[in-house]
Amino acid sequence: GENVEQHPSTLSVQEGDSAVIKCTYSDSASNYFPWYKQELGKGPQLIIDIRSNVGEKKDQRIAVTLNKTAKHFSLHITETQPEDSAVYFCAAPYGNNRLAFGKGNQVVVIP
Amino acid sequence: GAGVSQSPRYKVAKRGQDVALRCDPISGHVSLFWYQQALGQGPEFLTYFQNEAQLDKSGLPSDRFFAERPEGSVSTLKIQRTQQEDSAVYLCASSQGLASYNEQFFGPGTRLTVL
């Protein structure tokens, strides 16, 4: 099956700085890579995703980059704001349409 | 529009009791997933439905876990003879299509505590 790992487990950044979270996966056949944000007491919410035919995708302050050769993809958050504080999960598909999630990164934005 | 809803939001059970957790997916969504999320961990896949058909139950940890979606909309996850290790947040997600790249919309989860 798919093995997904995230680093670092906790990341603290000053408000306005950038945050980068890296995710590695094991199955070279994987072709879809989403990032989810989970706030306390809520379910995960998709914030950005990328397919294997592109190397980068941006949506306002959020971007995802993919390196298929190295089997890793990263989430980039620029100009961080307090509301960016949350747990972020990366995932990769396995089987028919299951998703394997990483353990999550706690991002803390310090005002 | 309404998102995915789950009930109850919190459930406390004594060890050995049976529990039933309900999921109301987004109307019209074909795919429905159940995940288990332990404290400080990511969601772990339990089972998958395409309409009323349970196509994958490989993630169910034991035969005490049972899920159904009889009419292809609302789903229930039942846990029989609960054990302390069943304590977790149970998340339901639905998606419009059948492919892995179709966005999964998650509900708020049911936090189960087994005493």
Image (cartoon, coloured by chain):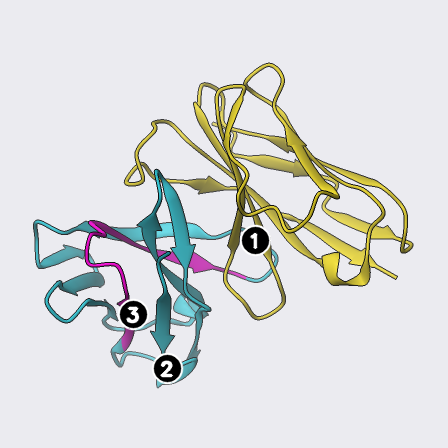
Q: Which mark is residue A42?
A: 1
Horizontal side, residue B84 vs residue A63: left or right:
right
Query: What is the C-alpha distance between the residues marked 2 and 1?
Result: 22 Å
| Disc 1 and disc 3 in contact, CB within 8 angstroms | no
Query: Magenta stretch: residue B63 in it?
Result: no
Query: What is the C-alpha distance between the residues marked 2 and 3?
Result: 9 Å
Q: Which residue is mark 3?
A: A23
Q: Position of residue B77 (x, y in %)?
A: 68, 36
Count numbered badges in the picture: 3
- In front of the other: A71 or A62: A71
Horizontal side, residue A61 vs residue B18: left or right:
left
| Disc 2 and disc 1 in contact, CB within 8 angstroms | no
Q: Which residue is mark 2?
A: A8
The chain letter under disc 3 is: A
| Kind of residue at badge 2 | Pro
Colour of chain B, in one word, is yellow
Q: Dot 3: within a 10 Å radius of its alpha carbon, few (fewer than 14), some, or many (20 or more) residues?
A: many
N-terminal label among 2 and 1: 2
Which stretch is magenta? A20-39
Q: Residue furthest top?
A: B71
